[in-house]
Amino acid sequence: MTLLDEVRADLRKLDIDDLVPGLRAGQLADVDEVVEVAALAPDAAVAAIRLADSRQIFVPVVRDGRWRRAEPDDGISMSALTAPTPLSVDRTHPTPSVDPRHERAPAVDMTNDVRIVDDAVVVKWQLLREAGSLIGPRIAAHLYAAGFTEMPQPFATVTWHDDLLATFTGFLPSAEDGWDWMLDDVRRMLDGEAPAPSWVPGIGHLTARMHAASATPTRIIAQPVARASLADLSRHYLALLDAPLDPQMAEAVLRWRPRFIEACTVLADARDAEVMPIHRDLHPGQFLRWRDGIAVCDFDGNPNLPAELQDLRGPTARDVAGVLRGFDHVAIAAARRSRDDHALTRAREWARGAREQALSAYLNTPDVPSLDDALLAALESLSPLHEAVYASRYLPRWRYVPLAVLDGGW
């Protein structure tokens, strides 16, 4: 019996929720078939599994009498760096020496399967097998080569038939993502426990420094700045207007429909926009506050975009719109946690000021690339449409945030 036969026989007895991280439970179609298996080490492998909706996922697996999903306690993630063909390893920087058995999963919501090894290396197993998944590691390597170090250090990528399987990056000690530390700081302000956060301008400056580095030619991307049409992006947002939503969300989106269509027209008319490598999904969760400051992480891109739109380059306004809208979202979520019945009004006032501070800091950072005001306004307007569809498809508990934006006219 081949390795594929063994894994296929054992995994077909399992439900999809037995094969994915717990936070992805209930979000994917049923298993159709294990289509391919690649060995990692003795009794460890990775399986490519086709789902009932024809998509494929990658699942690290181990054998302890039977094949099953590899959990952090199994400590197999580092073995991907020495796996035989058909897996391929591209090392960007030397990986620190670690005890591979000391592996754990962070207690945060992630699209992919993330493991932390020996508090030194972060291993991100790609969950969905999809085109464009190598863009993120390439952007990260480009930024690091351009001298931008306010991010986890890239160590290596592992690919399977030219599809991204796993990335290895540096671990940032005491790191918390912005959905924790930003929300807590704003909630404490709303409850009178602390003054207004002082970090807002720093987020603007950090985003600008990332864009300045992105516009710098490197051995990874020799010509980072280009011109492109945004018509495909416009068509994507127009298609989101027809995405299935629950009745309450659909009614809220309908009220904004003229505004969304107007913003799509702005994108459609941008036939020669300046584009460069950008983050592509910049929101509070991508800002880590750690022992030595604040860093940007996770260059996977927007999960709502189809594979054909997962492009290396985009307008800087797309990232800036994500930052500015992120303050609105932090304010709404913090108000929900506050003890003050009137917290939402005060949170909205804070968000307005934070947006102004961050944008001013961004624009006044040395060497920052140009920012198209019309594109920024359009992409900000389209943000709640993206959030409404994202909440419906991936994160139902998040739906109160786009609803607050759409109902309150933020």
Image (cartoon, rainbow, N blue to C red):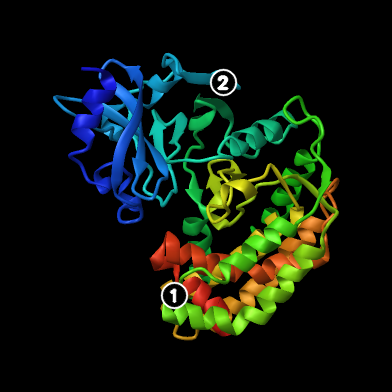
Q: Amino acid at mark 2?
A: Asp
Residue carrying label 1: 336
**Nearer to me, 147 or 282:** 282
Q: Is residue 86 left or right of residue 234?
A: left
Quarter the N terminus occupies: top left
Q: Position of residue 289 (x, y in %)?
A: 55, 48
Element type where label 1 sits in the image? helix
Q: Quadrant of residue 234?
A: bottom right
Q: Earlier in the sequence, mark 1 or mark 2?
A: 2
Q: Quadrant of residue 97?
A: top left
Q: Is residue 41 left or right of residue 319?
A: left
Distance between mark 1 and mark 2 Cα atoms: 44 Å
x 32%, y 24%: residue: 45
Mark 2 Cα within 10 Å, few/some/many (few <14, many 20+)?
few
Q: Is residue 100 left or right of residue 156?
A: left
Q: Position of residue 24 (x, y in %)?
A: 35, 51
Q: How many marks?
A: 2
Residue 178 drawn above or below residue 161: below
Q: Position of residue 256 (x, y in %)?
A: 62, 81
**Nearer to me, 6 or 285:** 6
Residue carrying label 2: 90
